[in-house]
Structures are given as structure tokens and as C-alpha cells.
């Protein structure tokens, strides 16, 4: 079972993934947490190029190519093998991020972005995607103090608004994507995620 988490900066994905892992382990599931970009040797190098070197002037096409390269490695080296072992994989960002950030945030050609993002999954589409939705104001206030802010965190209010709206559009077009209000208290968001998974998937009915 492959579950991805999406949302703008500060939406609480990584916190919710950790709490969900604990809840799933309590009912004896074997869970692997991962994230994009930056898994593995290739991913770590790619992450540095995209996010961590402030003066590097990356063309948007170079940027999307690097995110897609990171994903293909990640799917091949980690996600597929873990799923084949019967694990539940919880992934912080996946190909919807590419459509939202590179397609709508960077305004690249949407059809091209869809093709590249889909190709980069090597055919592996998530079983379910949790979209944690928060306002751009909340996002910016949550990340203002964040240690290790990256280049994309520092993008404009308009950029983050385009990404947020893109996510809502993706959710509207795809029954795979479930929107959860990320503005609520941590425990309440967790309960909503559990309810969403347990009502939609019999494998999670004990959550
Ligand atoms: P990260 O530091 O991992 O933070 P978070 O996921 O908590 O926001 O930042 C990853 C950044 O990369 C984030 O700003 C979203 C961006 N991103 C893309 O632009 N396209 C992509 O395909 C992916 C996977 C991430």
C-alpha cells in the first residue's frame, strides 16, 4: 500500500506521517517512511543542487528534470522494493508536487509537466494521497522561523497561492486525492486522516 502526503510548505505533512506510522505500527503494520526530494545517494546530491545552493540559477526545465530524476531513482531503489516486501510506504511528497510546483508554481507547460511527472513514477501511482490544505498565510507564518529554509520556501506569496490552488484542482480531478484541513490541531488532523483511510480502505479498517 503506497500512501503519499501533499501540501504547501508548513502544512504538517512530516508530523502527520510520523504519528500515522506509530498508529499503524500499533496495529502491527510494517511501515516505511520516506520523502522527496533527497532519498539515497543520488537523491541527496540532487536535493543539494535544487534546494541548498542559494546562488545556483536553475532554469525551471533543469529543475523539473532533477525532481523527476530524483523520483525515478527513489521509486526504483526504495519504494518498489519496500512495497514488494509487503510494507506500507508513507511518502512525503510525490508526483503531485511536480505538477503543483513546476507546472503551476513555475508555470511550465502543463501537458509536458504531466508527462514528465507521470513518466518519473515508473508506473507507480499511489493508492491514496492525503492533501493537507492550509491557507498561504498560515503556511508563511509557520515556515518563517523554520531552520534550514530552502529556496522554494522563500518563493513569493503568489507562487505559494498558485501551488495551493493547483493542489485543490488536482484533488478535484482525482478520487485518489483526499483533502484534509491542515489548519486544525495536530490530534484532530490525525483523527481525520485515520477516519479517511479506515473508511476508504478495508486494510485500514482497524485504524
Ligand atoms: P522540503 O525541505 O523537503 O520541505 P517540505 O516538503 O516540508 O515542504 O522541501 C522540498 C521542496 O521541494 C518543497 O518546497 C516542494 C519542492 N518540490 C517541488 O517543487 N517539486 C517536486 O516534485 C517535489 C517532490 C518537491
Image (spheres, grey):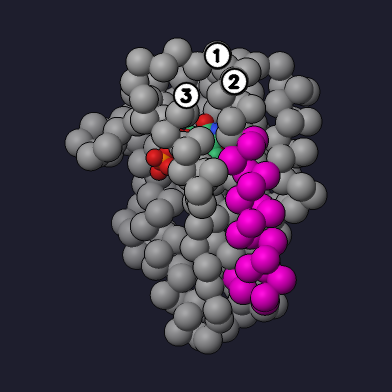
**Disc 2 to disc 3, C-alpha distance:** 23 Å
Magenta span = 68-88
Q: Residue at x 54, y 55 (%)?
A: 91
Position of residue 120 in the picture relative to residue 157 (left or right): right
Q: Disc 3 on helix, strand or loop?
A: helix
Measure the alpha-carbon separation of dots 1 and 2.
Answer: 5 Å
In the rendered image, which residue does mark 1 sit on? 59
Which mark's residue is nearer the viewer, 1 or 3? 1
Q: Position of residue 141 (x, y in %)?
A: 26, 33
Q: Is residue 196 left or right of residue 120?
A: left
- Residue 17 percent across, percent down from the top left: 45, 61
- Is 10 above or below relative to 163? below
Image position of 141 (left or right of 153): left
- The quadrant of the image that shows the N terminus is bottom right
| Front in this rendered view, residue 65 or 142 | 65
Q: How crowded is mark 2: few (under 14 residues within 10 Å), some or many (20 or more)?
A: few
Q: Which residue is drawn at 73% across and 31% down?
A: 116
Task: Tell me, yes or no, if residue 116 can be seen here.
Answer: yes
The residue singled out by tag 3 in the image is: 161
Relative to residue 52, is residue 181 depicted above or below? Answer: below
Looking at this view, name the residue that lies furthest to the front: 41
Q: Does the magenta stretch include residue 101?
A: no
Amino acid at each position: 500500500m503506497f500512501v503519499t502526503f501533499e501540501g504547501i510548505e508548513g502544512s504538517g505533512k512530516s508530523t502527520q506521517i510520523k504519528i500515522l506510522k506509530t498508529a499503524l505500527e500499533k496495529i502491527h503494520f510494517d511501515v516505511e517512511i520516506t520523502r522527496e526530494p533527497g532519498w539515497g545517494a543520488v537523491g541527496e546530491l540532487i536535493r543539494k543542487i535544487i534546494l541548498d545552493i542559494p546562488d545556483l540559477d536553475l532554469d525551471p526545465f533543469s529543475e523539473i528534470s532533477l525532481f523527476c530524476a530524483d523520483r525515478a531513482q527513489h521509486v526504483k531503489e526504495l519504494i518498489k522494493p519496500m512495497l514488494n516486501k509487503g510494507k506500507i510506504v508513507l511518502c512525503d511528497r510525490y508526483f503531485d508536487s511536480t505538477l503543483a510546483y513546476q507546472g503551476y508554481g513555475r508555470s511550465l507547460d502543463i501537458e509536458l509537466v504531466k508527462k514528465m511527472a507521470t513518466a518519473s513514477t515508473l508506473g507507480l501511482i499511489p493508492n491514496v494521497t492525503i492533501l493537507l490544505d492550509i491557507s498561504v498565510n498560515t503556511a508563511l507564518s509557520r515556515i518563517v522561523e523554520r531552520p534550514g529554509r530552502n529556496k522554494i520556501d522563500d518563493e513569493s506569496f503568489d507562487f505559494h497561492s498558485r501551488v495551493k490552488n493547483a493542489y485543490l484542482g488536482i484533488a478535484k480531478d482525482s478520487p485518489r486525492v483526499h483533502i484534509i484541513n491542515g489548519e486544525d490541531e495536530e490530534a484532530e488532523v490525525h483523527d481525520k486522516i485515520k477516519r479517511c483511510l479506515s473508511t476508504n480502505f478495508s486494510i485500514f479498517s482497524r485504524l
